[in-house]
Image (spheres, rainbow, N blue to C red):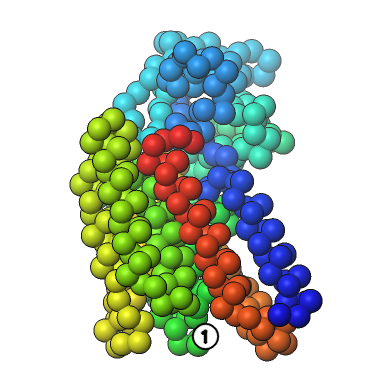
């Protein structure tokens, strides 16, 4: 390997080590659903449990009480310079596993129309935090507003009857989908792991098609409420998909399929044993299912037509898992029934735009390096990157399985 090749490898490795210190969905975010009527303003705030751990300075307090106290201090509604008082105490509401929901209620003067909403939640601990608010005014179709540390205030005209059309909703969620895919380091890591051993555009096209079919199916079913996935299991499984694909890349270059499959299966069985003895982690049935999947996935030869068909099916299956992860970001925004179809189409389209841009960029860079012969030892680079991605996937799998972050 020449000097330029060595520099290339070291640069890529440095970038990957940098990203390993970043959480998978590195954009800190939370959500709220506002219902504004003449009588009252009701709002439900939603955030992931690991997001609320950023606020935890008292380790004896529960996450519910921490989140409730934080919202009480950082959320207010005013008319002019007058605060709208809370009509009932902030309340913890039932929520899906891995998330917390808090209900607040305010009362403003019904004779006045202009209402100012201030959301300063999480900005002190994460300046890049974004808050997605779904606002519905007295029966009018809801619309989205984004709160940031630079723009923590939003003015609402309570007497407005203007309803956003389908196109505006579509555009809004296209942007949200693009932001989500670029903010999801785990999804990007998965795509890079898939790209490492592709050599032909035909393989690339099949990969994109398979992943798109998979995540579109589960994104649609979860968003429409046909399936309610477990958030913790889904996010742990996303980490597993990265580790599995990266492990397969190493197996292909080394030829040690059975050895890698056995080591992976033994590791998963040890995790299941921890669950059985100490009760921590994913359900034993989930771990056992991943163990069987790992053996079926890695215990094979890459040079048969059957294995190529299997690879496409595996990519679709991985897409199904990632689709549940995409759905979590979409459903948390508090979709109204009238907006759900446009939001689903727009969000999925945004994900595809971001995904295609990422894949095309990485593919062009890899091909350019090969054509210019800046990279001579392809196997070495694939092995190094695959090992790092496998470690990163395992890290996410473990910390999410045990709800560490």
What's the residue at 32%, 44% (across, down)?
271
Q: Residue at x 32, y 33 (%)?
A: 280
Displayed quadrant of residue 131: top right
What residue lies at 43% left-to-right and 65% top-to-bottom? 247
Please state the horizontal and vertical placement of residue 142, each as a whole percent of the image. 45, 41
Q: Is residue 151 left or right of residue 356?
A: right
Task: Look at the image and tell me whether residue 378 can be seen.
Answer: yes
- SS for tag 1? loop
Q: Nearer the viewer, residue 130 or 279?
A: 279
The quarter of the image holding the N terminus is bottom right
Q: Is residue 1 above or below residue 235?
A: below
Residue 188: percent from left, percent from top: 54, 61
Q: How many marks?
A: 1
Q: Nearer the viewer, residue 320 or 237?
A: 237
Toward which corner of the image does residue 33 lie, by quadrant? Answer: top left
- Give left or right: position of 145 versus 217: right
Q: Which residue is mark 1?
A: 199
- When asked about the image quadrant of residue 298, the answer is bottom left
Mark 1: few, some, or many residues within 10 Å (few <14, many ≥20)?
few
Describe residue 217's horizontal placement relative to residue 345 as left or right: left
In this view, the residue in front, 274 or 158, is: 274
| Residue 30 versus residue 62 in the image, above or below | below
Residue 243, horizontal then vertical, whole percent:
44, 59
- Left or right of 210, for residue 121: right
Kindly identify the residue that appears in the image at 48 percent across and 48 percent down.
395
Residue lying at the far left in this picture: please name it.
Answer: 285
Q: In this view of the protein, can residue 135 be seen by the observer?
A: no
Q: Position of residue 384 (x, y in %)?
A: 58, 67
């Amino acid at each position: 390997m020449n000097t330029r090749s060595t520099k290339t490898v070291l640069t890529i490795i440095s970038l990957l080590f940098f990203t390993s210190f970043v959480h998978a969905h590195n954009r800190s975010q939370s959500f709220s659903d506002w219902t504004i009527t003449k009588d009252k303003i009701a709002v439900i705030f939603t955030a992931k449990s690991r997001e609320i751990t950023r606020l935890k300075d008292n380790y004896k307090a529960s996450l519910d009480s921490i989140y409730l106290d934080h919202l009480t201090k950082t959320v207010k509604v005013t008319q002019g310079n007058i605060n709208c008082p809370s009509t009932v105490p902030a309340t913890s509401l039932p929520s899906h596993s891995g998330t917390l929901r808090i209900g607040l209620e305010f009362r403003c003067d019904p004779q006045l129309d202009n209402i100012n909403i201030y959301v300063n939640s999480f900005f002190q601990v994460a300046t890049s935090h974004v808050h997605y608010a779904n606002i519905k005014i007295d029966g009018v179709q809801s619309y989205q507003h984004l709160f940031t540390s630079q723009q923590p205030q939003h003015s609402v005209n309570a007497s407005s009857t203007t309803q956003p059309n389908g196109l505006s909703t579509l555009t809004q969620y296209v942007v949200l989908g693009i932001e989500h895919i670029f903010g999801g380091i785990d999804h990007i890591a998965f795509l890079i792991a898939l790209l490492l051993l592709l050599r032909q555009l035909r393989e690339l096209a099949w990969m994109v098609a398979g992943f798109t079919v998979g995540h579109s199916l589960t994104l649609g079913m979860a968003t429409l409420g046909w399936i309610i996935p477990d958030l913790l299991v889904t996010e742990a499984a996303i980490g597993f998909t990265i580790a599995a694909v990266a492990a397969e890349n190493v197996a292909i270059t080394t030829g040690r399929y059975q050895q890698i499959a056995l080591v992976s299966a033994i590791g998963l069985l040890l995790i299941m044993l921890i669950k059985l003895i100490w009760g921590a982690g994913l359900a034993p049935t989930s771990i056992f299912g991943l163990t069987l999947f790992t053996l079926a996935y890695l215990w094979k030869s890459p040079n048969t037509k059957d294995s190529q068909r299997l690879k496409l099916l595996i990519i679709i299956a991985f897409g199904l898992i990632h689709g549940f992860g995409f759905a979590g970001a979409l459903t948390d925004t508090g979709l109204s029934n009238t907006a759900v179809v446009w939001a689903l189409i727009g969000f999925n389209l945004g994900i595809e735009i971001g995904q295609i841009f990422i894949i095309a960029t990485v593919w062009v860079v890899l091909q350019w390096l090969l054509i210019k012969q800046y990279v001579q030892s392809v196997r070495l680079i694939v092995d190094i990157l695959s090992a790092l991605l496998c470690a990163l996937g395992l890290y996410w799998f473990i910390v999410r399985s045990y709800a560490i972050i």
